[in-house]
Image (cartoon, rainbow, N blue to C red):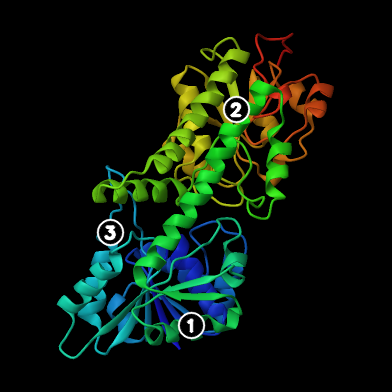
Amino acid sequence: MNIAVIGTGYVGLVTTAVFADLGYRVIGVDINETRIQQLCRGESPIYEPGLDEMLKHNLEAGRLHFTTDTAAAVRASEIIFIAVGTPPSADGSTDLSQVESVARAIASAATRSSIVVNKSTVPVGTGEVVARLLAEHAAPGVSFDVLSNPEFLREGTAMYDAKHPDRVIIGAASPADAQPLVELYEPLHCPVLVTDVPSAEMIKYASNAFLAMKISFINEIANLCEAVGGDVRHVAKGMGLDTRIGDKFLSAGIGYGGSCFPKDVESLVAVARELGIPSALLEAVRQVNGDRVPFFIERIAQALDGLAGKTVAVLGLTFKPNTDDLRDSKPLDLCRQLLDAGAAVRAHDPVAMATVARILPQITYCADAFDAAVGADAVILATEWGEYTALDFNELHTMMRGDLLADGRNLYDLSRAEAAGLRYLCIGRRECGAIKGSSEQIPA
């Protein structure tokens, strides 16, 4: 089976690589010529564990090709996936201009009837929009079946997720229309749900909004735990043992970010607003998440008797570990707010510093966590990269001018921090209560 995937961003590139690895002939398409040249060399433009190796293996096997020629890719393929960006507009609604442009290009190029699949995250009703554009621009006698096939990839584990999915969702006008896609996914041996197109489109948004809600919920519970002397880690574990709830996405911290949760919650709110349907719960999820970084910054400011003139080390800049994605990154928000408060920021991240340096050149970028801690009044863990898990706190403290360790991901234990002479600020635990004033300073 010949497949074209239009768009070589995060979703498109993972989709392209995995289908090729399953044995299909796949053409990846993008208008960015520099990116296509890079991909033809087997070099991924994004950081995702295992992706480079899969690209090179399938390029060498001849199953995978990349091109800027959309028309040629369309004419060579029976199934065409649309996997372009759907960024938020200023009002929170989804910008579908790239999807619409690709639909027109497919219709103009196609010389035979084929299957067009929306892989991009799109609001309910987009399938109808794509179908209309295809029909308007198609040559006489050429028709298209338009399907929805949302992705559920987690950045950092996307290669595993793509080959071992919890489920595959296929939205189609009829079970017969869905059958070619059902057969395409058959080698994965996973549950496949065939439904109508609007339901498939909604499943993606509803799933992400629900997970975002779990994160905002546990962050509110964390605030209550601090007030009553509880431990949000124990609360989350106790909740997660209930099979109706589950233990995923119940980690308190500085909030969710990335390319999906913020955008998808905003998009659902925008759809509800357009339809005149109340969305109080979704709006609360968004509000709680927006408050997390300012809340954490304020606690750090209290512990340091203000941030103006202070030096703060930030460990981690990406929105989560094992990715170079900076979209809606809470650590970046944290850095910006520290700078706005008059603090000097020293930072380290294993993969994203070069990119962030172009965004925030006023930050000092450091070789490792200990280098970042040099002369710092406080060290903040912002992204829980593996290399920060077992930091030598004694060495860290020796590098610092101050003694505050602010754990935005609840990664560490109070006893380890105290044994090294550090004051420990965390989230949702009895020992995480407000820390006032400064203890004896250790010279840098």
Is 335 rendered above or below residue 203? above
**Residue highlighted by disc 3:** 96
In this figure, what is the number of numbered marks?
A: 3
Check disc 1 and report its element: helix, strand or loop. Answer: helix
Picture quadrant where residue 142 is located: bottom left
Q: Position of residue 156 (x, y in %)?
A: 59, 56
Picture quadrant where residue 123 is located: bottom left
Q: Nearer the viewer, mark 2 or mark 3?
A: 2
For the question of whether residue 317 can be seen, the reply is no
Give, as a three-letter code, the residue at label 1. Answer: Val
Is 90 rendered above or below residue 7? above
Residue drawn at x 82%, y 27% as measured from the top left = 415
Residue drawn at x 48%, y 59% as measured from the top left = 45
Point out which mark residue 182 bears: 1
Give, as a three-letter code, the residue at label 2. Answer: Asn
Packing grade of label 2 (10 A; few <14, some 14-19, many >=20) is some
Give, as a three-letter code, the residue at label 3. Answer: Leu
Q: In the image, 226: left or right of 213?
A: right
For the question of whether residue 35 can be seen, the reply is yes
Q: In the image, 378: left or right of 332?
A: right
Residue drawn at x 45%, y 78% as measured from the top left = 65
Picture quadrant where residue 72 is located: bottom left
Point out which mark residue 223 bears: 2
Q: Nearer the viewer, mark 2 or mark 1?
A: 2
Q: Position of residue 71 (x, y in %)?
A: 27, 79
Residue drawn at x 55%, y 56% as measured from the top left = 155
Tell me whether the residue at label 2 lies in contact with that at label 3, contact meaning CB atoms closer than 8 angstroms. no
